[in-house]
Amino acid sequence: MHEAPAVAFAATEAPHRSARPLARIEATLRGLARKGRQRELAAADGVDFTSNDYLALAHSARLTDAARDALARGVPVGAGGSRLLNGNHPEHAALEAEAARFFGAESALFFGSGYAANLALFASLPQRGDLVVHDALVHASARDGIRAGRAEAHEVPHNDAAAVDEAIRRWRAAGATGTPWIAVESLYSMDGDRAPLDDLWAVARRHDAMLVVDEAHATGVHGPLGRGLATHLEGQEQVITLHTCGKALGASGALVLARATVRDYLINRARPFVYATAPSPLMAAVVRAALVALAEEPERRARLAALVDIANRTLSARLGLPESGSQILPVVVGDNGRAVHLAARLRQAGFDVRAIRPPTVPEGGARLRITVTLHADEAAIAGLFDVLGAAIAEGRP
Ligand code: PMP
């Protein structure tokens, strides 16, 4: 008769008992809650003063009809695989050709999201021996890309073109021979202010640097036909722009506009492109319709500009805060709990405003991020600032 072989888990001593596997994760969540930082998902609630659907295209007949037409033409919902396999569909190519023409660049590449596009750009293009100088307020997706990449990274104070110049100068003086990359947004997502693009472009030219401009919040809203704030730079060899499709374009995905060499490189080397299922061909058709809407419905932009003007003037008159001059109006309150309380008060009054807390914004920079979209009108803007003015005057909750 055989003796059962000894197996590791049949030890006679009591096994070492670690904490339950989720205990540390629960503790982290409790820590977030203690600091007023725990986030929850909540459905839309009241007049929209929080989304990035600036031109109210998401529910528009223009886009929903485009989706229906595409389905009727046999465009599939799913691509079925990577663009590099047979997930490549004529709708992707049609969108990219239209986008290159619309924005005025040599080529375009469509990604499933702005997050994936930024990750792809920064993780793959800057090489070992390069330097990426980025603004202190660039989006998390650019930061994650930079962190995943091989180049040296250097953060400069917000909107400080002289600091960008100085960082590259020092790096060169130390003998570096690689390529410098400059990463900025044209319109900052949480502050609504603009980058000094002409100064940055001068710095880029001086140092033979690449300038990567994330136009996420400018696309569709600013510049001629809504082509963004870097329109005059599109097509330059040293410029790459990112136009997201989930904000003013009312759909989802992102378009990277650049020289064909950059596009070819991304197709070969950018892991979020190579290893992801292609974006839905149906979405490509819808985004193409959104670009047509920008060209054919300038009245949406004009109406939004009028509302943005009113909202900025009311923010300044009612709350004494500086105007951002854009459709993104930050009301910085500092304290996390206070920001959440004010947002809740506004929602009770029928205005959907959300609190933005660290780490999305810097520590101590909790705020209400009020956006102006075509879902609001003059009366709603007046009402919003009446309620907000009264709530702030009441002091702390
Ligand atoms: N860049 C900026 C500046 C953004 O605000 C966002 C969206 N929050 C992104 C990139 C990511 O785009 P997406 O939502 O399409 O992933």
Image: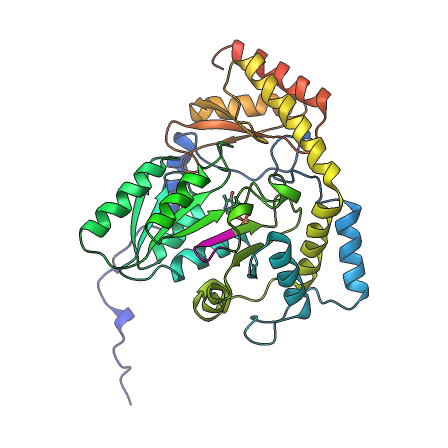
Question: In this orientation, does residue 22 appear?
Answer: no
The quadrant where residue 382 appears? top right
Image position of 36 with respect to 207: above or below = above
Q: Residue 335: where, in percent of width, then height? A: 42, 23
Q: Looking at this rendering, what residue extends furthest in the top direction?
A: 394
Q: Residue 294: where, in percent of width, then height? A: 70, 46
Q: Residue 176: where, in percent of width, then height? A: 22, 56
Image position of 196 with respect to 273: above or below = above
Given residues 254 and 236, the one toward you in this image is 236
Residue sitting at x 43%, y 44%: 184
Question: In this orientation, does residue 113 appear?
Answer: yes
Q: Looking at this rendering, what residue extends furthest in the bottom direction?
A: 1
Image position of 356 with respect to 334: above or below = below
Q: How many marks?
A: 0
The quadrant where residue 41 appears? top right
> In the displayed structure, does residue 256 sit left or right of residue 88?
left
> In the displayed structure, does residue 135 sit left or right of residue 98?
left
Q: Is residue 239 magenta?
A: yes
Q: How is the image coloured?
A: rainbow
Residue sitting at x 67%, y 65%: 94
Residue sitting at x 75%, y 37%: 299
Q: Looking at this rendering, what residue extends furthest in the left direction?
A: 174
| Range covered by the magenta-colored residues | 236-241
Given residues 183 and 284, the one toward you in this image is 183
The quadrant where residue 81 appears? bottom right
> In the displayed structure, does residue 331 sit left or right of residue 148?
right
Q: Residue 261: where, in percent of width, then height? A: 47, 67
Q: Is residue 157 magenta?
A: no
| Placement of the N terminus among the 4 image quadrants | bottom left
Residue sitting at x 31%, y 60%: 150
